[in-house]
């Protein structure tokens, strides 16, 4: 027989299980919330003297292409996102990925609400007007000239390195050539056996190293997207499911937690007590609209899955007056 399902309905989500009083947990959450407010205020002050973070949206996906913006999003706003771009030097693998950084819709909306970012989309490509075409041609010529200069410099450095290598191995090369001539019964050749190259070294152009920039110095034209109005690029506005998820995401984020997508564990979010690079998730957050039916088999499956991966299932329901109700579920006999 399966062990009974224990149900707790705390006023706030648990921080550390076992032995701590509600007063201590409340103080810890209050401290986290205070740090969150100070981080947000500091980030807003920095944003007043710099450009806004640009979040590019396309078919509902929110992407950040700037490495500096991605770093600030994680360090200053505790938002994780997911790197989804292939690395330029290792494109045929997915163990390590790079830019762009894809944000959850709730993460992107949170940054916009905090006044730290704007949603943008690329404008349609237009034919260059008179005068711009010559400018583009000059940029192409400058690029090819830069490639040629880089090739000549790499060839010079490769020639210097090869000459130094031959100088270090000259004695071994001379002995080897003399030994082979002696075996064939030939007379020694002082010039050939010296180990010096017969012709100047030429670096093959196919071996040339080429820089692949990951950020454009002069990005294309973009236009701002209104996140409060539904559109093909941002269809989440006025969606009841998104509104419920965002309220829950914001509530947990305000309490100092880190959050990421929870689809791999059958939930909406994974909730971490600290940076996911240092901590495992403690909770699997499942967003349940208040009053909506929740099938028993889905509830049992989610609770057992959470216990199997050593996490607590956290049922989250937006309540009245902007509140959020949290209910944690665990299989008590499997702990």
Image (cartoon, rainbow, N blue to C red):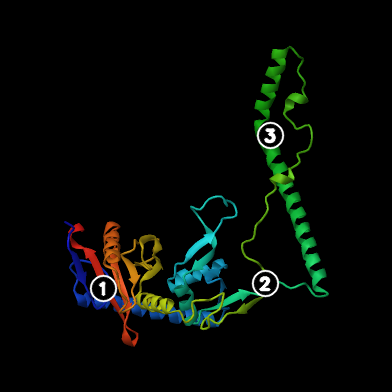
**Tag nearer the camera, 1 or 2:** 1
Q: Which badge, 1 or 2, is on the more N-terminal residue? A: 2
Query: How far apart are the two marked residues, 1 and 2, measured between alpha carbons?
Result: 47 Å
Q: Quadrant of the C terminus?
A: bottom left
Q: What is the crowding at mark 2: few (fewer than 14 residues within 10 Å), some, or many (at least 20)?
A: few
Q: Quadrant of the N terminus?
A: bottom left
Task: Judge from the rendering whether residue 139 lies leftward or rightward of residue 332; answer left or right.
Answer: right
Q: Which badge, 3 or 1, is on the more N-terminal residue? A: 3
Q: What is the crowding at mark 1: few (fewer than 14 residues within 10 Å), some, or many (at least 20)?
A: many
Tally the numbered discs.
3
In-front residue for pair 317/195: 317
Task: Judge from the rendering whether residue 238 lies leftward or rightward of residue 136; answer left or right.
Answer: left
Residue at x-position 20% and y-position 76%: 22
What element does badge 3 sit on?
helix
> Which percent across, then down, holds residue 162?
69, 39
* Among the 4 quarters of the image, the one containing residue 125: bottom right
In-front residue for pair 3/155: 3
What element does badge 2 sit on?
loop
Q: What is the crowding at mark 3: few (fewer than 14 residues within 10 Å), some, or many (at least 20)?
A: few
> Which percent across, then down, holds residue 309?
30, 57
Location of mark 3 (residue): 167
Task: Judge from the rendering whether residue 5 lies leftward or rightward of residue 112; answer left or right.
Answer: left
Query: How far apart are the two marked residues, 3 and 1, measured between alpha carbons?
Result: 75 Å
Location of mark 1 (residue): 327
Residue at x-position 57% and y-position 68%: 66
Location of mark 2 (residue): 220
What element does badge 1 sit on?
strand
> Which percent across, then down, holds residue 46?
51, 79
């Amino acid at each position: 027989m399966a062990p009974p399902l224990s149900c707790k309905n705390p006023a706030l989500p648990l921080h550390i299980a076992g032995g701590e009083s509600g007063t201590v947990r409340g103080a810890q959450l209050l401290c986290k919330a205070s740090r969150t407010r100070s981080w947000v205020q500091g980030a807003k002050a920095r944003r007043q003297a710099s450009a806004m973070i640009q979040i590019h949206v396309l078919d509902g996906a929110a992407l950040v292409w700037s490495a500096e913006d991605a770093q600030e999003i994680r360090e200053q706003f505790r938002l994780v996102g997911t790197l989804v771009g292939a690395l330029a030097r290792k494109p045929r693998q997915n163990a390590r990925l790079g830019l762009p950084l894809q944000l959850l819709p709730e993460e992107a909306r949170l940054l916009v609400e905090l006044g730290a970012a704007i949603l943008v989309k690329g404008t349609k490509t237009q034919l260059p007007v008179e005068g711009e075409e010559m400018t583009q041609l000059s940029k192409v010529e400058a690029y090819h000239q830069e490639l040629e200069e880089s090739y000549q410099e790499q060839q010079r450095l490769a020639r210097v390195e090869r000459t130094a290598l031959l100088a270090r191995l000259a004695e071994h090369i001379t002995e080897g050539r003399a030994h082979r001539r002696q075996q064939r019964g030939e007379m020694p050749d002082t010039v050939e056996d010296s180990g010096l190259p017969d012709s100047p070294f030429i670096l093959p152009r196919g071996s040339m190293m080429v820089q692949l920039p990951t950020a454009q110095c002069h990005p294309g034209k973009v236009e701002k997207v209104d996140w409060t109005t539904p559109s093909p690029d941002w269809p989440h506005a006025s969606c009841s499911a998104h509104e419920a998820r965002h309220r829950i995401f914001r509530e947990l984020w305000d309490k100092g937690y880190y959050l990421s997508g929870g689809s791999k564990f059958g939930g909406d979010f994974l909730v971490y007590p600290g940076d996911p690079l240092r901590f495992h998730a403690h909770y699997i957050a499942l967003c349940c609209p208040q009053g909506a039916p929740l099938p028993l088999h889905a509830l049992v499956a989610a609770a057992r899955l959470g216990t199997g991966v050593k996490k607590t299932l956290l049922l989250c329901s937006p309540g009245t007056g902007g509140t959020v109700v949290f209910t944690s579920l665990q299989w008590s006999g499997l702990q």
